[in-house]
Amino acid sequence: MHFSARDHEVVVLDNFARRRWHRERATDSLTPIATLADRIDAWREVSGREIVAHVGDATDAAFLDGVIADFLPEAVVHYAEQPSAPYSMISREHAVETQTNNVVGTLNLLFALREHVPGCHLVKLGTMGEYGTPNIDIEEGYIEIEHRGRRDVLPFPKLPGSIYHLSKVHDSHNIHFACRAWGLRATDLNQGVVYGIETEETALDERLLTRFDYDELFGTALNRFCVQAVIGHPLTVYGSGTQVRGFLNVRDTLQCVELAVLNPAELGEFRVFNQFTEQFSILQLAELVKRAGDALGYAVELDRYVNPRVEAEHHYYNAVNDKLLGLGLQPHYLGDELVRSMLTVIARHRDRVITDAIEPSVRWRPDSCGGEPALERDLPPGRSTSAQPHPRFAARRVDLPSPVRDDAPSVR
Ligand code: USQ
């Protein structure tokens, strides 16, 4: 809709996987999502513009080839991936499905572009989670290294934190190779955690709403906290909450994709942009939601959960995000007012909240947590998981809340 509104000719491909994954888990978007056909009709009514839809799967080579050969796009925005870290960690089947969907879908697309439109610009949704949390500044895709007296600019080291994040690392390597070997052009948008409900276009008509997930699998931290505040569920802070991530408003994701498309990579170039606007710790987000919620009369509480994931909680984090800003990105920053407005929109849909979908149940190390309480405060007196790590996983620890480390970058 964002591109169509700006007079681009748009074709959309969908296999409705997200709807299926939600049905499988008995969860749903907070906002009601119309069928694709109804949304296209609504967009035509509201804008006078036509979006053409093809229903099919990116892992189906014949389908993808057919659409690409017919439309001959100047740019492809590739969003067709299973995007949830916890979903990919449920079971072997979910891990295999995630990597098959993501890696094979992207590989098919690379071959379709090579075959039919080698000059087309691929704009691929990557993730900041490809880098993990190294104890050095995170560059945009590449790092200059001096090693034994020689220098080179090489891909930035990757430390992905889930099978899902790994799938994006594999994609990055495949796309980079296709640029080097076949001369394709691509931009990898290494996106941080997205929050927000509305975009300029979805606000035009209820039938154009985009999804807003708050469940354990597809909901991201801030969106989840906002729904929890409205329904009176304590905010589900995992571990100490001192994990730091890059975040951005959903409106800014559209600006970023547009900027990437309008300023294409060179032929043969694999370009990486870090796509986030601010860094926060999870605890800072929870405190922000508490403040905004309390101001609206919700009595917001925080609960610290034994972290279901394996991730560093006390760590250095400073990621570069100059490239999109250099192209003209105008960030919408996070603040009390924005959170209050999210809470207000969420309250309109609160009857749709499926409360069973909120508690975390997927654990990165399932066999290490049998019978262990979900909440830190339910652990036996005097024991925290940091005091007595599971013998098989001595690195696992949950500490009392503490501020972001002194040497972490300042946060807005
Ligand atoms: N977290 C909580 N409580 C919750 C949910 C999450 O404390 O209820 C914590 C997690 O432990 C983690 C952080 O918040 O430390 C972020 O988790 P998330 O679920 O909001 O986001 P994540 O799993 O990292 O994945 C999301 C998107 C994914 C995207 C990624 C960007 O689902 O598609 O790639 O954000 S990034 O985080 O930079 O890798």
Image: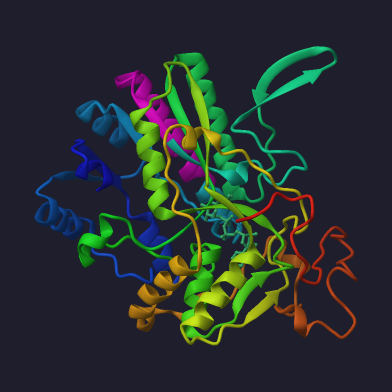
Which of the pair 106/62 is nearer the observer?
106
Residue 296: image x %, image y %?
Answer: 46, 83
Residue furthest out toward the top: 150
User: Which residue is depicted at the point 32% across and 50% down?
Assistant: 15
Rendering quarter of residue 351: bottom left
**How is the model colour-coded?**
rainbow
Up the image or down, 168 lies above or below 371; here it is: above
Q: Residue 260: tell me if it is visible.
A: yes
Can the viewer see residue 60?
A: no
Residue 258 % position (x, y): 35, 38
Q: Quadrant of ligand 1?
A: bottom right
Q: In this orientation, which residue lies closer to the viewer: 239 or 355? A: 239
Count the numbered circles shown. Answer: 0
Residue 40 is situated, as x and y percent measured from the top left of the image, at 17, 53
Left or right for 331, reference 237: left
Q: Is residue 53 left or right of residue 404?
A: left
Q: Quadrant of residue 88?
A: bottom right
Foreground: 11 or 225? Answer: 225
The main secondary structure of the magenta stretch is helix
Q: On screen, 374 above or below 3?
A: below
Measured as percent of width and height from the top left, residue 316 is found at 75, 48
- The residue located at (41%, 49%) in the rendering is 252
Is 310 a magenta residue? Answer: no
Image quarter hosting the C terminus: bottom right
- In the image, taking residue 23 as reference, residue 34 lies left or right, namely left
Quick check: 298 left or right of 63? right
Q: Is residue 120 magenta?
A: yes
- Start and end of the magenta stretch? 99-123
Q: Along the line of sight, which residue is nearer the eye, 273 or 353?
A: 273
